[in-house]
Amino acid sequence: MLQLEHLAELAARNADALSAKVAAFDLGGRRFDGNLRPEVMGVVNLSADSWYRESVCLTAESAVRRGRVLVAQGASIIDIGAESTLAHAGRVDEAAQNSMLLPVVRELAREGAIVSVETYHPAVTRACLEAGARVLNLTGTDRSPEMYRMVADHGAAVIICHVQGANVREVADLDLGADPATMLRDHFARQIELATSQGVTRIWIDPGLGFYYRNLQDSGARIRHQMRVFLDTFRLRTLGWPTCHALPHAFECFGEEVRSAEPFFAVLAALGKTDLFRTHEVPRTRAVLDTLAVW
């Protein structure tokens, strides 16, 4: 059972990281400054394989409607993906992703929304940035220098995900015996150096807790790992860039109340000083963050 003593011990062991500040930047006419307040990213899934049915939109029209609703509910960024990260999900090639994504990206960007596209394909990245996307949610490491140059050329931002493999659909096992914050810091330090060398000036880092690793199928092991990373997130702030977290579901614990899972994990992520919360449940997560801000 997580107790206050655990939090106190974690803070005492890493006191130097508690006061670390992260970069703030302007994007799409909005100031993102995690030192002052967290932001929420809403999700639109264009793949029928995505299991979170509330976020699945199978037409461009329904996806645009959901994007508008998410903005009205308090999402600062709308993240759109055309391929599910589930292990059994079908692959969606670049041409198919573009045909699904581009009409939605163009319309939401035209209406002034800050649009993020989740992909690991260079051709999809290029087309979506040209269509008005302002954020690349990069779920791979293959050809990352090319992707970073595209982001820089369009004055966009990148979410650098921790992916143990070429992309989110080809992940290897995690080393669960290692200190996760140290492992993540080493990975992100390399990727940040690569991104900034290509001219990128707006970065979030994402530990990738929503990805499906084979050695995290045991629910207890997975939830312990997720909780530990959430609470340790403040240790990554010494890298100088804000952190984005995709909030998970712990279906084994929440069952029929699975829509309450992301708001629960939002509390842990907030305690760890997360800057951007990627969620399917924008109003619930926004309410949690607003309540915590009353303190």
Image (cartoon, grey):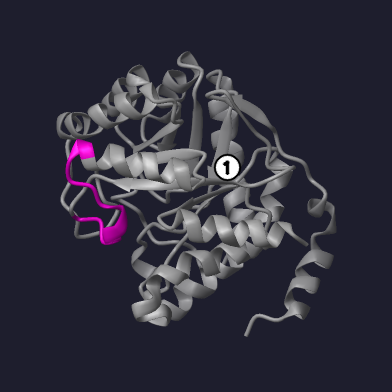
Residue 191: % across, % down = 54, 36
Residue 177: % across, % down = 55, 69
Residue at (66, 62) in percent of width and height:
291
Q: Mark 1 points at which residue?
A: 188
- Dominant secondary structure of the residues highlighted in magenta in the image: loop
User: In screen coordinates, is 129 left or right of 277?
Assistant: left
Residue at (21, 36) in percent of width and height:
60
Q: How many labels does the image show?
A: 1
Quarter holding the C terminus? bottom right
Range covered by the magenta-colored residues: 49-61
Secondary element at tag 1:
helix
Is residue 289 shown in magenta? no
Instruction: Judge whether 268 appears above or below 196 on screen.
Output: below
Is residue 84 or residue 45 the one in the foreground? Answer: 45
Callout 1, which amino acid? Phe
Instruction: Judge whether 189 appears above or below 284 on screen.
Output: above
